[in-house]
Amino acid sequence: MREPLQRAARRWWPLLLILAAAAAAYAPAVTSPFWLDDYFYLVAARDLSTADYARAVFTPWSSEPLLPFTRDFWRPLAFLTFELLEPVAGGRTWPYHLLVLAGHLAAAVLTWAIAARIDPRPPVRAIAAGIVALHPGPYQAVAWVSSVNSLALPLGLGAWLAFLAATPPGQPVRWRLVGLSAALLALGAMTREGAWVAVPVLAAWHVAVTARWQLRRRETWLPLLPFAVLSALYVVIRTRGFTEPFANRDIFDWGGHTWQNYRTLLEFLLLPFREQLSTLSGWRHTLQQLSIPVVPLLALGSAALRRWPPAILLGGALLSLFAVAPNQLGIGPRYLYFTIPWLALGLAILAADLLARFPRLPRAVPAAAGIAALILAAVALDDRVADWTRWGPGEQQRWVDALRAEYPDLPPGATVYAAGNVPGWLTVFGGANLGPAVQWYYPGAAGAVYVPPGEIPELGPGDVLFTAP
């Protein structure tokens, strides 16, 4: 009994250490307040009936005023999470945060499992899972309540893992697992469209690695058919039977900004320096610009050497960026969340190749280096998350607390005119995020209006002017 436990401990301790480090790094976010978009979902979950809420989130291009995001995004399962949690959690944030964090840890575990299936070398799984768990770039995709749509990532990874198990090389296809894979992908696509990134990786791996010597057989292509059907069905649903565009061009459009966004994402891919309110400058920005061709060159070099596993994975990472680069509302490191697993797996394979060139290197050396890197990454990520909770959700909560202290109650239909020291990101899009925040804390209030400096609003009966200190 002791020997099996010892073998299990030797095999699994790196994963357990990675998960513990990630949980510790994201601990500051678990108690952080609601922020920005969160209040849209909370107010809608409170004020709409379950039937009306479900109808709004499952209807593509919905026109529900309390859920404006349902017009621009078809993410019914992510939106539905608020309807399910709000009656239980109410104004407590930690249940939402724990759900998103659990999904993130699941993504790290699934990355480990995928790495173990596609490459037998232990360093591959440890490096890949460590990068996914602790990459500091997309921290907001884990730390923010509205990032519950990030649960699409473990669903997408689970879809590929199930497909790998369904199509073992040289063995009959296990169709039940193919069905499970397609079902997981469908659930992921209904949570966030980023789950679709798994499909080109899944298909390319099947064609170039798993069944590369059987491409002339019809049976080789049949396991991919369910995903083609799912893709077509998704297009029909998203466009409401081709009566609407596939995407809102006010948000996603293939304009000149797309390439600039793509370059920006490449800069943060390998060197995710802390976000700044102004453009990065100096040596950090120079290093980021120099890092832009690294991943494309590694992908091309691997393909040229017919090293298909890293070529497919790194190519999948680069391809995934096109799913977010057309975004016209701004781009940032959090949009890398659905790119990191493919990058991590590809880099982990190349790192294991490099380690194999030093057979005399004691095992303790890379293990010690990995533990040191893990600790440093966890400390840096924890500091970044804690800092974000202060200037993001924390600052908005301080504004709300000051408002509630000055106005404990508001009459029904009242409007709050917000002036003074209003947090900057609450003023964007005409102060659209002010209204839901006020409505959440003052049920029955009409909302809030941002008052730019120098303007004097006309107050109606019951309206208040709040000048933030």
Image (spheres, rainbow, N blue to C red):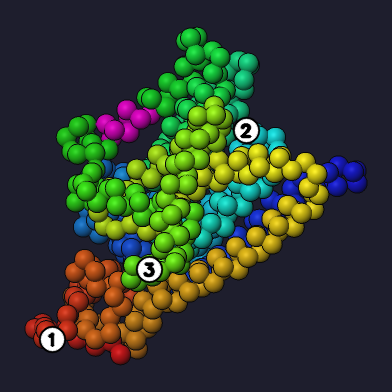
Q: Eyeballing the image, is 464 above or below 15?
A: below
Of marks 2 and 1, the one in the foreground:
2
Label 3 sits on residue: 281
Label 2–label 1 contact, CB within 8 A: no
Foreground pick, 416 / 287:
287
Foreground pick, 48 / 159:
159
Of marks 3 and 2, the one in the foreground:
3
Of marks 1 and 3, the one in the foreground:
3
Label 2: few (<14), some (14–19) or many (≥20) C-alpha neighbours in 10 Å: some
Quadrant in which residue 354 is drawn: top right
Q: Main secondary structure of the magenta part?
A: helix
Is residue 187 among the parts visible in the rendering?
no
Q: Looking at numbered disc 2 in the image, what kind of residue is underneath it?
A: Ile
Mark found first going from the N terminus, 1 or 3 = 3
Using residue 49 as the reference point, say whether residue 32 is left or right of it. Answer: right
3D distance between C-alphas at marks 2 and 1: 62 Å
Using residue 35 as the reference point, say whether residue 10 is left or right of it. Answer: right
Using residue 398 as the reference point, say whether residue 19 is left or right of it. Answer: right
Q: Give the residues in magenta.
A: 230-237
Q: Eyeballing the image, is 314 above or below 72?
A: above
Q: Looking at numbered disc 1 in the image, what kind of residue is underneath it?
A: Gly
Label 2 sits on residue: 118
Q: Eyeballing the image, is 107 above or below 178?
A: below
Residue 281 point in image, percent of width and height: 38, 68
Residue situated furthest top in the rendering: 217
Which residue is located at x 55 percent, y 36 percent?
Answer: 310
- Quarter of the image with the N terminus is top right
